[in-house]
Image (spheres, rainbow, N blue to C red):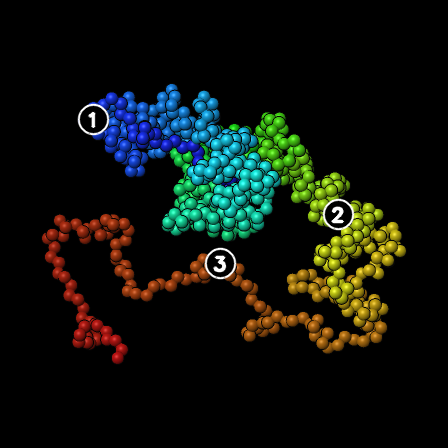
Amino acid sequence: AGLEKRTARRGSGTGAPVYASGDQGKLRGGNMAEESPSTVLLAALQNAIAHGASDEEVLAKADAVLQEEPNLPEVRHCKLVALLYCKRFEDALQLIGDDPAGCELEHAYALYRLGRYQEVLPAIASAPAIPGLVELKGQALYRLGRYDEAIAVYEALLDDNYRSKDKTRSVEAQEIKANVVAAYVASKQTEGLPAVMERLQCAPRHSFELAFNAACAFVEQREWNAAEEHLELALRVARDSLELEDLTEEEIEEELAPGHVQLAYVLHAKGETAKGIELLSRVLRAKPADQASMAVGTNNLVAARGARELFDSLKRFEKILERAEGGEMQLSNSVLQKLNGRQQHALWLNMCLLYLHSNKHDRCRTSLKSFRKHCANSLSAACVEGSLMLKEKKGAGPDAAETFLSGVVQAEEERLKGMMDVDGDEGTAGNELATTQLFRAQLALAAGEQSRAAALLVGLPQLASRLGVVATVASLHEQNGKLQEAVDVLQSVLPKLEAEQHSGVMPVLRVLAEMRKRMGHYEEAAALYERLLKEDDDDEEDDDYEQLEGGVLKPRRMNALTGLIECASHFDSAAAERYEAELPELPGASRVNADVLEETSGPGTVPSKGKAKVDEQQVAPQPSTMATGKKRGKSEAAKRRKKLKRLPKWYDPAVPMPEPDPERWLPKHERSAYKKVKKRGAKKDENAIKGGQGAVSKDHMAALDASANAAKETVAPQPAPPRGKVKKGGSKKKGRR
């Protein structure tokens, strides 16, 4: 799976609730005595709200008041808002209960933050139309992918409520405009976006969100340079506004993380992969708080690396995972809620592929279950499972995987055809089916079935018209020796390329001409070569087809001209000679005499060392030797003289050479004449007892019997005096002086 771009950035306003207050900014406590404890607690709550205390503190003080007086609606509302600001949305829903009367905005907001978008719309439908709820409805429609309805809601807000001179409402209007632009980009209505921004009276320089969304529009149109310029503009605008708020550099970089992630995607798309990887690594090192930026940045970094640095990629990917109830790791719900369906699909697919390349097959299979749960109709999951079958070598290899995939495609084909676009191009379902067909073709090639691979590639209109696929199909037919089928495939795509003025027309014509010539269709090939030459003459701006100085042609035009001459020589020799006159003269050809060159014998070949020599009787003598009859010179005879072998000095011709030792290849210690050399040292005592410890021979048994030798008186023999004189100082040797 490739890299995933960030979605268009919407405004920060989501209709969030605020703390409610009573008349004149005071909470009403009902009929209570002024000296009661609840009055003191209520005053403490009012003071906390007035002085901007933390949400946890407000929540604690509201709980304290409700313990004394549980029937205070304003205090109950304060607790509800505090729970929402503390991100305790489940507790907020429990506090609201089954009857959200009076708390419709808070109820819808809690459902929205929990990602239960389908429940938000019914909750809003039964509530009065207030600006916060209407804006929340647009946000929910955007999350559900119903972009046209979201655009209508946003534009209605601008027309009815937000066109005001009030500064607060003008800020809210800027956020709504950013949401309108984001909805247009998400629905891929990017061509008319400049007119929309002009109608809304907004420009990219007005805010970071507007510049970011304009860059996303250029990303959808694959205009990478314009997208990079608008992203840099967005980063400058955001930095200028954040510096006015006296934020630190670390806080500013954290706020700019979404723009940097999108810029890295654009750099990768432009081919500057190294810069993109470096930028993503710097963003992820800072650990941004924006979970969507963290998830998309990690996914893009893993995809840009591919099969390299798998261990580090696994560590990074597991940072955005959480442990589910069954113990397996999966993408956290907080991450999935902030990503659209396409981004979620890319993350699930890349996680499975990462485990697959890392040979963690059990985790890959577990991730596949979650992948199918969140993306039920994805054929990419089936492709991953087919790859897993190949890795684990289950069944019969490629054949088993192909059988599995063909069954999946047949089961899902009708549903996918209903989802495809009218023209059958670039639809989500069409891309899924095309990806599966490409994988099936790869499996067919792995099994050695080139004809089936070509049939699979031609089977879909999304692939059949693409130049790379057409070239692959033609190459497969050519390898099978089916030149006519290869020509038919190329000929079928040529009219469409010509209508689109595609740059691939000339390469297709060259391949067609070469194949026609190889098939012996010289007239058709000559017509194609003539067209190539004519196209080259008409295209004066292209330097690849112009004639260089000195009469030297560039290779493409030279090949077309030589091919035309070769083909015309088979049916029209006059035309071949006429085209031959257009060939430039070879450098140095004027100094060569053709007659002398014909009489000269060709260059001889010297037999290399180790190869068999050619029989002299089979080689014809040189013309000079036949004509003159002269003998070979001394130098030539010396070259043919055999080199004598070198003999040893003791060699005598009268005495025959001895036979070689038959044991010369054996190690010395294994030869029959080998004698073991004893080690230097004192002689061993012949009477020493040998064998294991405690073993005694029979001859020594009597000598060792203490009872038999007790009566005998033995006299220890005196040691013999040493021979020679004994030097003073013992036997210690002195070293050399």
User: Quick one: label 3, few (<14), some, or many (20+) residues within 10 Å?
Assistant: few
Q: Nearer the viewer, residue 110 or 345?
A: 110
Q: CA distance from mark 1 to mark 2?
A: 97 Å
Q: Compared to 299, does 697 lie above or below?
A: below
Q: Residue furthest bottom?
A: 737
Q: Quadrant of the C terminus?
A: bottom left
- Residue 331 is left or right of residue 474, and the answer is left
**Residue ID for mark 2:** 509
Give residue 666's mark: 3
Mark 3 or mark 1: whose residue is earlier in sequence: 1
Is disc 1 in contact with disc 2, using a CB cutoff of under 8 Å? no
- Considering the numbered disc 1 on the image, is that residue within a helix, a strand or a loop? loop
Tell me residue 258's x, y (percent): 46, 44
| Quarter in which the N terminus is drawn | top right
Q: Which image quadrant for residue 216? A: top right
* Helix, strand or loop under label 3: loop
Residue occupying the point 81% across, 68% down: 597
Residue 34 - label: 1
Instruction: Select label 3 or label 2 by which is in front.
Output: 2
Residue 634: x and y in percent read 73, 77
Which residue ends up furthest to the top in the rendered image? 99
First-in-chain label (3 vs 2): 2
Upstream in sequence: badge 1 or badge 2: 1
Q: Which residue is at 39% across, 34% downward?
A: 323
**Mark-to-mark CA distance, 3 and 1:** 116 Å
Q: Amino acid at mark 1?
A: Glu
Element under label 2? Answer: helix
Q: Is residue 641 above or below residue 525?
A: below
User: Which amino acid does the dot numbered 3 rest on?
Assistant: Leu
